[in-house]
Image (tube, rainbow, N blue to C red):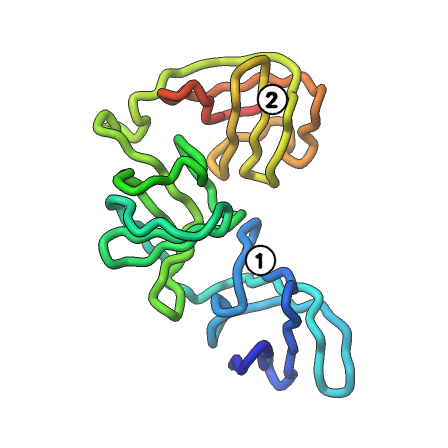
């Protein structure tokens, strides 16, 4: 049960201050995504019969999972918290959204994309993945070319599993589909790695394996 910025978990009222991290795995959620019936783990401080949450981990969201493909329109907001439409369906992205064959800043009206995510209670879809599609995307690889790179990491940014770094003059991006033979969280600037993946038309490498 939810009312205002509070939840009732069992018989305990949990207040949720603005800025409290709410996550499902590595994904960042908002309070509206915690619906009746969701299974949650709450950390916080108790005051009488109430707990003030410092973090909420959503173990089972209870939200409908959807996959949509369409043409981007009505692009609004600023990355990483942008919105757009596929037809009449509103799509929201945030800093946890994984982008394949492009980035949030590459979104533009007229792009064809595949979206996977959760349908929220307000009818919008919170995207967990946005994949840019192309006319040559018959086998799901978008016409990309297999490559292997070796060298020292520079310009490391992002949070696991969606990280970005350079090897030489090549930009590398990882996603939830990347096989990290070296743990994602241990990647660091100056570390020598070997990357297998596929290069897109703009030269970026989508990593399938990092070691």
Residue 74 vertical position relative to residue 108 in the rendered view, above or below: below
Element at label 1: strand
Q: Is residue 10 left or right of residue 200?
A: right
Task: Using the numbered discs, state the Cα–Cα distance from disc 2 to disc 1 in whole angstroms.
Answer: 28 Å
Foreground mark, 2 or 1? Answer: 1
Residue 203 vertical position relative to residue 129 in the rendered view, above or below: above
Residue 53 vertical position relative to residue 2 in the rendered view, above or below: above
Q: Is residue 62 left or right of residue 169?
A: left
User: Residue drawn 29% across and 21% down?
Assistant: 143
The C terminus is located in which quarter? top right
Q: In the image, residue 7 lies at what x, y percent?
A: 58, 78
Q: Which residue is mark 1?
A: 23
Q: Nearer the viewer, residue 18 or 28?
A: 18
Label 2 with label 1: CB-CB less than 8 Å: no
User: Residue drawn 71% across and 75% down?
Assistant: 52
User: Residue drawn 53% across and 59% down?
Assistant: 29
Q: In the image, residue 53 lies at what x, y percent?
A: 69, 71
Element at label 2: loop
Q: In the image, residue 26 lies at what x, y percent?
A: 57, 49
Residue 55 vertical position relative to residue 207 in the rendered view, above or below: below
Q: In the image, residue 55 lies at what x, y percent?
A: 67, 64
- Number of marks drawn: 2
User: Residue drawn 27% across and 51% down?
Assistant: 86
Q: Which residue is mark 2?
A: 211
Mark 1 crowd level (few <14, some 14–19, many ≥20, 10 Å Cα): many
């Amino acid at each position: 049960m939810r009312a205002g910025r509070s939840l009732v978990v069992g018989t305990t009222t949990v207040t949720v201050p603005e800025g409290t991290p709410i996550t499902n795995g590595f994904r960042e959620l908002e309070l509206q995504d915690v619906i009746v019936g969701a299974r949650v783990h709450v950390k916080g401080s108790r005051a009488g019969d109430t707990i003030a949450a410092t973090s909420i981990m959503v173990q089972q969201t209870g939200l409908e999972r959807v996959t949509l493909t369409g043409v981007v329109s009505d692009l609004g907001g600023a990355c990483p918290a942008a919105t757009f439409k596929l037809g009449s369906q509103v799509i929201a992205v945030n800093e946890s959204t994984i982008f394949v064959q492009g980035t949030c800043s590459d979104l533009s009206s007229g792009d064809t994309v595949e979206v996977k995510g959760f349908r929220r209670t307000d009818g919008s879809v919170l995207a967990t993945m946005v994949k840019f599609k192309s006319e040559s995307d018959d086998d799901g690889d978008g016409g990309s070319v297999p490559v292997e790179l070796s060298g020292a990491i520079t310009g490391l940014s992002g949070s696991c599993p969606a990280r970005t770094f350079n090897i030489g003059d090549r930009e590398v991006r990882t996603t939830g589909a990347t096989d990290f033979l070296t743990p994602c969280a241990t990647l660091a600037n100056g570390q020598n790695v070997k990357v297998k993946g596929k290069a897109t038309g703009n030269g970026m490498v989508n990593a399938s394996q990092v070691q």
